[in-house]
Image (tube, rainbow, N blue to C red):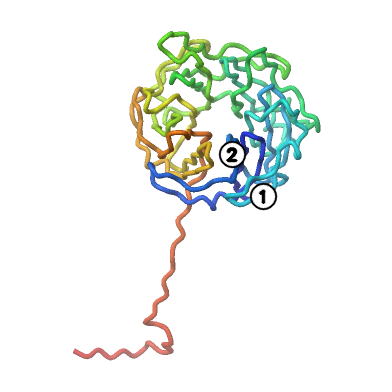
Amino acid sequence: DEEVLITISHAGYVKRTNAREYKSQGRGGRGSKGAASRDEDFIEHLFVASTHSYMLFFTEQGKCYWLRVFEIPEGTRTTKGRALQNLIQIESTDKIKAYIAIKSIKDEDYLNSNFIFFCTKQGTIKKTALECYSRPRQKGIIAININEGDELVDAILTNDRCQIVIATKTGQAIRFPQEKVRPMGRNSTGVIGIRLSEDEDEDEDDAVIGLVSANTEEDTLLVLSEKGYGKRSSIADYRITNRGGKGIRTMNLTDKTGGLVAIINADENHDLMIINRSGILIRISIDEIRTMGRNTQGVRLIRIGDEDSIASITKVLKEEEEEEIIPDESSENTTDNSEVTITE
């Protein structure tokens, strides 16, 4: 049982790689090659899981599929991987949009005390008990009913003690207690979570880019823009509201930063891994990214080319520094140190 890094490309190629293959670098660097890809392909999803975990894959059309992590083919840092359609029976017109690693599908206490929280591109949310997804079927099941013109953006594992933060492409975010959303069945559509911007001065293509859960006021949120700028802010800066509002500003976006592309719950015990559409990946220690105000632009986390942009981010446990043991050369070949003569 070990921690592995799983990547899924836009074209649907998947692989698992030992996380130690990616060494930590300073922020603002160019990164290293993360995966081989075809000209029109790029790494779209990047996440960490244990080899003994169950993976739940959710598609943009709202279906759920299962796979054990050790069943995902192992590859090196630069290999392309294997087509996901060869591992699970996903429809050719559908694609993976979210994934959750769960430790067990047989522990009843675990299944009944946790929920899967969904969010769509247009801001619809839904909460369903994890127990509803504990019986794997080869052809998958319906996880959430998706309205026409909408699609699933993200799904996370939660409990009733946490709070939800949803972020949009235009830099807005909303925070509300998860207990305010009642549990629903698998085939339900859900309720409104955040209202998208309709301001003519804003991007017309506003959409939800992700959601996270938070448990304490000490948590920090890390947001990243498409051109490599990011920052950390205290979750205490985001006031608690009811679901269904427009939210508040989470990052000051400009032409230099581009739109918001990712949000994660970050702490200093983790490293941040960022991968570009061109396949370049960088690993940064999160404690190098200082905490700053909510309505700020942030700092450059990775340098990217004019035609490139951010594809995905994830966090991994910080690398443990190995202590180097240096032998005492003066004691080599010494058989008796009981008598020592000192000469001035």
**Residue 252 appears at what percent x and percent y?**
36, 22
**Residue 23 appears at what percent x and percent y?**
48, 51
Kindly identify which residue carries mark 1: 74
Nearer to us: label 2 or label 1 = 2
Q: Residue at the spot x=73%, y=45% of the render? A: 71
Above or below: residue 288 compared with residue 90:
below
Above or below: residue 111 compared with residue 187:
below
Q: In which quarter of the view is residue 86 placed?
A: top right
**Residue 151 appears at what percent x and percent y?**
63, 19
Q: Compare marks 2 and 1 and give the one earlier in the sequence.
A: 2
Which residue is situated farthest in the front direction here? 39
Q: Residue at the spot x=53%, y=34% of the render? A: 312
> How far separated are the C-alphas under marks 2 and 1?
23 Å
For mark 2, does the 10 Å Cα neighbourhood hold few (<14), some (14 to 19), or many (20 or more) residues?
Answer: few
Q: Residue 264 vs residue 126: left or right?
A: left
Kindly identify which residue carries mark 2: 39
Q: Which mark is residue 302?
A: none
For mark 1, does the 10 Å Cα neighbourhood hold few (<14), some (14 to 19), or many (20 or more) residues?
Answer: some
Q: Nearer the viewer, residue 255 or 7?
A: 255
The amino acid type of the residue labelled 2 equals Asp
Q: In which quarter of the view is residue 29 placed?
A: top left
